[in-house]
Image (cartoon, coloured by chain):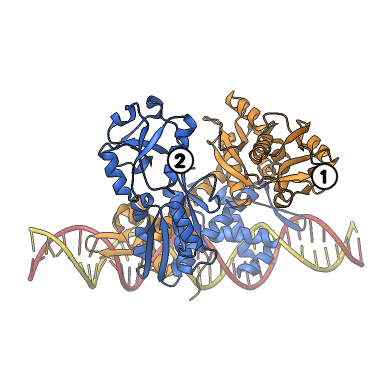
Chain colours: A blue, B orange, C yellow, D red
Amino acid sequence: MAVPSTVDPELLRAFVAVVECGGFSQAAGRLLRGQSAVSLQIKRLEECLGVRLLERSSRRVQPTPEGELILGRARRILSLHEELIARAREPELSGVVRLGAPEDFATTRLPRLLSSFVRAHPRVALEVTCELTLDLLARFDAGGLDIALVKREPTFGLEGTRVWREQLVWVTGDKAVVDTGGPLPLVCSPIPCVYRGRATAALDAQGRPWRVVYSCGSLAGSHAAVRAGLGVTVLPKDMVPVDLTILDEAVLGLPLLKDTEIALVSAPTLALTAERLRDFIIRELEHGGPRT
Amino acid sequence: MAVPSTVDPELLRAFVAVVECGGFSQAAGRLLRGQSAVSLQIKRLEECLGVRLLERSSRRVQPTPEGELILGRARRILSLHEELIARAREPELSGVVRLGAPEDFATTRLPRLLSSFVRAHPRVALEVTCELTLDLLARFDAGGLDIALVKREPTFGLEGTRVWREQLVWVTGDKAVVDTGGPLPLVCSPIPCVYRGRATAALDAQGRPWRVVYSCGSLAGSHAAVRAGLGVTVLPKDMVPVDLTILDEAVLGLPLLKDTEIALVSAPTLALTAERLRDFIIRELEHGGPRT
DNA sequence: TTTTCATTATCAATTTCGCCAATCTTGGTC
DNA sequence: GACCAAGATTGGCGAAATTGATAATGAAAA
C-alpha cells in the first residue's frame, strides 16, 4: 500500500475534535458533519497512519498512548494551517516600522533577510537605524524604536529573543602586527562597543597588554584600518571580508572569544505591521540561521 | 464565501513543486499528475488563500512576493506532515535508553514529561541516573549515558541544546536565619554542585560572608534541612516545596541570582530509540516549557 | 436476566470534486 | 505572420466522501 506524503488535515481536525469533545457524536456537532462521517474519518486516519489512535471502550473515548503522541503533532499542524490562512488573507500591511540593528548585522544579514518582506508589503516603510548596541538600547528604551536587534552580553540585555549566534574571531589584514612584541594594536568602534569590551576583557584576563590604535564609528572604516595593517579587530566569523585574515588563537596565543549573540527586543505595544515584521524576522532567522 | 480552516496539503505540495521546478509542466511530472491538474490546483490554492501566488509571465514562472512568504510556511507544513507520517508508521521502539538528569529536575519535571513517551512505547526501558551536573557530564563523557540533561553554566557546557530556563531564588524554612548577623548559613549539595557555586560566587561578589551548615547529596535531605531552619538554599523557582519560603533579594540584601539553564547533550551516535527520546524531550519542553 | 439507552460501526445511495484528455489562448521567436 | 511552447479552459468520467438509515455493542436500569 502506497504511503502518502501528506495527511488530509480534515482528518486531523476530526481526531482532535473527538479527543477534545470526548466522543464521536459531540465532535460531529462541532465539525458540522454527521456522526457516521466522523467515524469514517477516524477510520481513514487510523488506516493512513497504520496506528490505532482512539480507545473506544466503555462509555468514554480516549486517545491511545500512540494517539497522544500524534495528537500534539496534529494540533501543531492545524495551528500552522490556520496561521497560513490568516496571514494570506490578512489585509495589506502599511505604515512605518522603526528598526534598529548593529551596523555589521544591518549590512550583512539584514538586507537579504528583509527583502522578501518589503517586496511582499510594498506599502510598508522600514526606517533602519544603525548604532552600537548600547546606543540602540538607549534609543529603544526612550521609545525611538519599535524593534531592535542587539548584541547580547551575559551581563545585560538578557531579555528579548535570541535570533542569532555566531563565532567571534580575531581578524587582521597583516599578520605581522600581532608579533610586534609591544601591546596588541586594536582597531574597533568607540567605547560602548560590545566587541571592544569583549576583546579587551579577554586580553586583560590573559594578562596580555593592548592599545587601541584606531577607533572608528563606521564598520567600513574599521575594515579599512585593519586592511591597511593598523592592527587586529574582532568580528563575527561570517562577516569577515574576504581580503582579511582570520587568526588562529591557538597559534598566536590570543585569547578565545565567546560567541556573539544577537537578540530581538520589541516594544510592549506594537502596531500590527511591526508585529508582523517581528514575527517574520524571528521566523526567518530560526530557519536560515545557525543552529543553537 | 466560507474560509476553511485548513488547506489541502496536496495544493501546497503542488505550489512548492511548481516553484522548485520552475514551471507547471515540469512540476506535473514530479507530482505524477497532468499539467491541467497542476494548473487547477494552483488556481484552487490561490482562490482559497485569496492571494495571487505565482507570476506567470513570459517563459518563466516565479512566486510573487506574497507567494514567497507563503512558500516558507508551506514547506514547513509539508515537512511536519511527512514527519507525522514517518513517526506514526515507524516500527515499535524497544531497548534501553540511559538518561541522566539532576535530581531536582528528575523528580519534578521528568516524570510528567516522560509518561506519554513510555506509555506509547511499552517495550522501551529508561534507566535514569540522578547525579550532580558535573558528575553527569563525567559519566556522559565516559560513555555511560546516551542522553544527559545538565545544568548549564556560562563557563562550561555551552554545547548541547537548551531545553529549560528558570529563575533561581533563595529559599528558607525560617526567615530568622538570614538576619543572624553572622555569615549566611547555606544548605546545599556537595562540592561539584552548580547551584552551590552559583550561590557562593554571588555572595562573594557582594562581599557577604557565608558558611555551609549542611551539605547533603540528596535533594529531599536538603529540603528537610532547610525546612528545619538550618539555613537557606538556592532552588529553581518552580521547584520550591510549598512549605518553604521564597526570599525577596531586594528586601534582605541577598544577591540576585542568574537564571538556571538546563541543556540536553547526547552521544554522537545514538540508537534509534534514544534518538527518538531525545527529539521527544526537546519537542515537549520547547512547547510546555517557559518561553525564552 | 432482560430492557433500555446511548454510543459507534456499517451499508447503500448519492453527490461532490478532482483528474484526464483534448482544445483554446497567449506571448515570444524565427 | 506562422510557429512553438507553456499555461488556461472545458466536459466527461471515476473515485471517494457524505449522508441517512440501520445494525451492533456495551453499560446501566428494571
Q: How many marks?
A: 2
Residue A68 shown left or right of residue B80 in the figure: right
**Residue B142 bears which disc, if any?**
none
Tell me the residue at 69%/41% (across/down): B110
Q: Position of residue A261 (x, y in %)?
A: 47, 45
**Residue B173 bears which disc, if any?**
1
Residue B66 in view (yes/no): no
Q: Position of residue B258 (x, y in %)?
A: 62, 44
- Badge 2 element: helix
Q: Which residue is mark 2?
A: A198
Q: Are marks 1 and 2 on the same chain?
A: no
Q: Position of residue A169 (x, y in %)?
A: 39, 37
Q: What's under tag 2, amino acid-wise?
A: Arg
Residue B76 shown left or right of residue B227 in the figure: left
Q: What's under tag 1, amino acid-wise?
A: Gly
Reply above or below: A62 against A172.
below
Residue B203 shown left or right of residue A291 in the figure: right
- The answer to which image quadrant residue B267 occupies is top right
Residue A269 in view (yes/no): yes
For disc 1, the neighbor class at 10 Å (few under 14, some 14 to 19, many from 20) is many
For disc 2, the neighbor class at 10 Å (few under 14, some 14 to 19, many from 20) is some
Reply above or below: A238 against A41.
above
Q: Residue furthest top?
A: B142
Residue A3 vs residue B76, the one in the foreground: B76
Q: Position of residue A71 (x, y in %)?
A: 62, 53
Residue B119 vs residue B165, the one in the foreground: B165
Real-space Cα separation, disc 1 to disc 2, in angstroms: 41 Å
Output the chain of dot 1: B
Tell which tag, 1 or 2, sits nearer the viewer. 2
Output the chain of dot 2: A
